[in-house]
Amino acid sequence: MTAKPQIKIAATYMRGGTSKGVFFNLSDLPQAAQVPGAARDALLLRVIGSPDPYGKQTDGMGGATSSTSKTVILSKSSKPDHDVDYLFGQVSIDQPFVDWSGNCGNLSAAVGSFAIASGLVDADRVPDNGICTVRIWQANIEKTIIAQVPITNGEVQETGDFELDGVTFPAAEVQVEFLDPADGEGSMFPTGNLVDDLEVPESVVAGGVLKATMINAGIPTIFVNAEDIGYTGTELQEAINGDPAALERFETLRAYGAIKMGLISSIEEAAQRQHTPKIAFVAKPAAYTASSGKEVGEADIDLLVRALSMGKLHHAMMGTAAVAIATAAAIPGTLVNEAAGGQERDTVRFGHPSGTLKVGAEAKLVNGEWTATKAIMSRSARILMEGWVRVPGDVI
């Protein structure tokens, strides 16, 4: 039997924040993949190199971590007062599915740059020099993101001296603003409580009950106290990712929290919804040595946060989770706010495995319910490679 030859698809490989992904213009995708469905998922899985039982994604563009197993599809926006529609697909490494349930905050920083370079932003809105404000419609969660992209001589300025912990080299700063960042519909606190007594199996925690703050902001996130699950909050990746029993406990905790948040109806569904919710643990400030060797002092941060993504401890912090952290920190009574000292605040600097990150957020009470108005952070983005990605022709 003669195998079909490979097909090539225009694509751009980009870093955004502490993540990397393959970016596509919707119109460049094969016709069958221009609409949601099995053909699109099959294509993106093959592009990234999944599912890979070896967990390496050797035969694709993925980097064998949740941060580098990502895809983005952009198109000219169909929404008034927006430039570009942004659809994010988190590709599973070892399972045959793409999770479309949430956004990637880190790659959001690269969306504006790609949109400008690809001609998706009207030329009259791009200055010769200065800042181009790119209005992004985040299609997964139906929210607006504003990216402030630096422009030099009419082109995106990618190089600079802005440093971001978790990224080795400096680049140009891109400010990203998430408007009304509560994820999805309904209350920002889906249980109606700032802190819940979450019932979990005894295998997760002795007594089977754990204090948890569950919030829909940036991305649905479950926060617990580090000390309640036997950690300090200063852990680096190997302390968690090298412990299969710990990963299993976190996944069980995540699944029970997802049910409590109304995101799934059975524990079994959690396996097909790996991208959301996120699970994170928080602690009061303490000194530690980051994965790069950088010393983080107790006085350098407001609190410690460690978060898991796609079943593993993240090497830094997901951008959407950073929004959740900042929003929860701004609301007195949450576990995040209490770990940060308990006072009212509109910015927070937290320690993560790679260093620190400062994020701003605004939250207010409206008719007795908390609502987030916006969250702001600075990231950077850079094109790593552009041209075509190739996949076997029998994929779709």
Image (cartoon, helix red, strand yellow):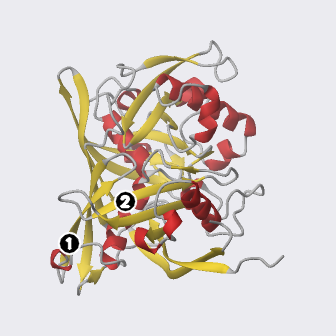
Image location of residue 242, percent across then percent down: 72, 45
Residue that protrudes farthest toward the top in the picture: 207
Image location of residue 130, percent across then percent down: 18, 76
Few, some or many C-alpha atoms within 10 Å of disc 1 (few <14, some 14-19, many ≥20)?
some
Q: Secondary structure at mark 1?
A: strand
Q: Quadrant of the N terminus?
A: bottom right
Q: Within the image, what quadrant is residue 181 found in?
A: top left
Q: Using residue 154 as the reference point, say whether residue 50 is left or right of it.
A: right
Question: Does any portion of residue 72 appear in the rendered image?
Answer: yes
Question: Does any portion of residue 172 appear in the rendered image?
Answer: no
Image location of residue 228, percent across then percent down: 56, 23
Residue 86 tag number = 2
Few, some or many C-alpha atoms within 10 Å of disc 2 (few <14, some 14-19, many ≥20)?
many
Q: Using residue 157 as the reference point, say whether residue 211 is left or right of it.
A: right
Hey, what amino acid is under mark 2? Answer: Tyr
Residue topped by disc 1: 131
Distance between mark 1 and mark 2 Cα atoms? 20 Å
Judging depth in this view, the residue of 255 and 162 nearest the camera is 255
Hey, what amino acid is under mark 1? Answer: Ile
The correct choice, above or below, for 379 with respect to 342 in the image is below
Residue at x-position 70% and y-position 80%? 5
Q: Using residue 168 as the reference point, say whether residue 136 is left or right of it.
A: left
